[in-house]
């Protein structure tokens, strides 16, 4: 297809794509002057679940639960040069846990956060025991019923967002089906309906 016939370009907002002079969008617009540049709705959704504020005074309770969860998982996976992960695995085996695998959280694959939260919730008893044995500062959170309730709530929210994100991807997906899925989720989440 000739670039002159391009009428729309959707990007993730990266500078290499949206740069005013040398970005892909600028180069396409130089050839196809009527081309409209858009920001990908899947990436917009990903940005929407990022922390709203890095200001510690404005940090929400749920953001605090998320931060403690990520800190705990990263400690288990990376503490003691990998030794903590092996010790945790042995502890889970002793406690007859079904699934002893925890995922390491990074900012890049945000989609994995839903799976991490679900696994942490399932392994909360084992994590509590492990962190208590290590005298880790996060151990007391896993004994607090209110904190565990917030963890379950977060796991549920991120599970819905992960399912939505997965359903928005694919070769046979168009803007109309994506918009319909987003509107359906918005309708489900609207109170009183």
Image (spheres, rainbow, N blue to C red):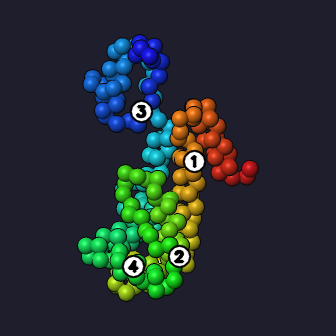
Q: Position of residue 109 (x, y in %)?
A: 40, 52
Q: On the image, which quarter does residue 168 sit in?
A: top right
Image marks 4 and 2: residues in contact by CB distance under 8 Å? no
SS class, disc 1: helix
**Considering only order in the chain, which callout, 3 or 1, is on the residue closer to the N terminus?**
3
Residue appearing at x 51%, y 79% in the figure: 97
SS class, disc 4: helix
Q: Where is mark 3, residue-wise?
A: 11
User: What's the distance in space between the residues labelled 2 and 3, CA to CA?
Assistant: 41 Å
Q: Where is mark 2, residue-wise?
A: 98
- In the image, residue 37 above or below residue 86: above
User: What's the distance in space between the residues labelled 4 and 1, CA to CA?
Assistant: 32 Å
Quick one: quadrant of the N terminus?
Answer: top left
Q: Position of residue 149 (x, y in %)?
A: 57, 72
Residue appearing at x 68%, y 49% in the figure: 188
Q: Nearer the viewer, mark 2 or mark 3?
A: 2
Crowd around label 1: few <14 · some 14–19 · many ≥20 (10 Å): some
- In the image, residue 1 above or below residue 66: above
């Amino acid at each position: 297809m000739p670039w002159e016939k391009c009428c729309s370009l959707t990007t993730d907002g990266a500078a290499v794509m949206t740069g005013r002079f040398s970005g892909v969008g600028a180069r396409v617009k130089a050839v196809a002057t009527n081309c409209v540049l858009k920001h990908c709705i899947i990436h917009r959704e990903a940005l929407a679940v990022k922390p709203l504020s890095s200001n510690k005074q404005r940090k929400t309770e749920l953001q605090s639960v998320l931060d403690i969860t990520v800190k705990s998982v990263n400690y288990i996976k990376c503490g003691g040069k990998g030794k903590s992960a092996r010790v945790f695995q042995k502890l889970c085996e002793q406690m007859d846990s079904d699934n002893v695998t925890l995922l390491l959280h990074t900012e890049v694959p945000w989609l994995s956060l839903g799976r991490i939260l679900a696994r942490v919730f399932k392994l909360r008893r084992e994590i509590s025991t492990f962190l208590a044995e290590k005298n880790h500062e996060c151990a007391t959170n896993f004994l607090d019923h209110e904190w565990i309730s917030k963890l379950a709530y977060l796991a549920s929210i991120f599970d819905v967002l992960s399912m939505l994100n997965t359903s928005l991807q694919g070769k046979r997906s168009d803007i109309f089906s994506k918009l319909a899925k987003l509107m359906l989720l918005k309708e489900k989440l609207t109170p009183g309906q």
